[in-house]
Image: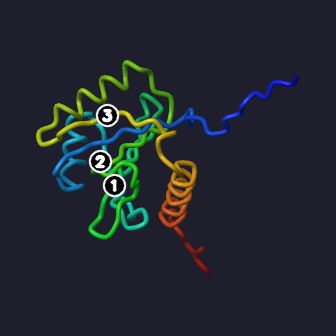
Amino acid sequence: MVKKIPFNSRSEPSQYTLFGISCHLKDYRLSYLLNAKLDLEFTKMDDFQGFSFYFCRDEELFNIYYLLSNRIPESILLPELKQTDFLLIVEGPMKKINKDRLLQNIKAIPNVLTSFEIRFTTIKNYENMLADLEIHCMKIKKNSTMKYSPIKK
């Protein structure tokens, strides 16, 4: 009798880490406090499907940070995470000690109720969300490149 081995094609994306943040702060206030506490430089970018979107690049640790609001008055970005107000997506390598330190620093911010790591497999369509986020970032980069016309003599 042949044994069937189940194949799970849904695995964790190795280059991304997802954190949830629950707080009653506005997005600009949270990004300011994260900048101060984590020594980062989040900048406001064009909204991602109507949700506020902040971006930061850490050259020392080779990480890229995306801060997204999870809720707007009309909708929730990830319905599986109804209690989560903000999502912090870290792209790049991240050791466990760095994850723990990041969570401790976020929890130490006043008015932050909690922060926690989220497994991507608990999110229904995380592949689509990451692909949409990547496309959104490419559009932002494309629009921000300086366009010039050569000087005609």
Q: Amino acid at mark 3?
A: Phe
Q: Amino acid at mark 2?
A: Thr
Alpha carbon distance from label 3 to label 1: 14 Å
Secondary element at tag 2? loop
Counting residues from the start of the chain, the first of labels 2 and 3 encountered is 2
Q: Which mark is residue 127?
A: none
Are the residues tagged 3 and 1 within 8 Å (C-beta)? no
Counting residues from the start of the chain, the first of labels 3 and 1 encountered is 1
Placement of 60 over or under 91, stated as above or below = above
Label 1 sits on residue: 70
Residue drawn at (18%, 52%) of the image: 29
Counting residues from the start of the chain, the first of labels 1 and 2 encountered is 1
Task: Classify mark 1: residues with Cα within 10 Å, few (<14), some (14-19) or many (20+).
Answer: many
Residue 20 or residue 62, whichever sits in front:
20
Are the residues tagged 1 and 2 within 8 Å (C-beta)? yes
Residue drawn at (31%, 44%) of the image: 41
Residue 95 sits in which quadrant? top left
Task: Classify mark 2: residues with Cα within 10 Å, few (<14), some (14-19) or many (20+).
Answer: many
Task: Give the quarter of the figure containing the N terminus.
Answer: top right
Alpha carbon distance from label 2 to label 3: 10 Å
Residue extending furthest toward the bottom: 153
Q: Which mark is residue 116?
A: 3
Give the x, y percent position of residue 33.
19, 43
Residue drawn at (47%, 46%) of the image: 123
Secondary element at tag 1? loop
Label 2 sits on residue: 84
Residue 83 or residue 129, whichever sits in front:
83
Give the x, y percent position of residue 121.
51, 39
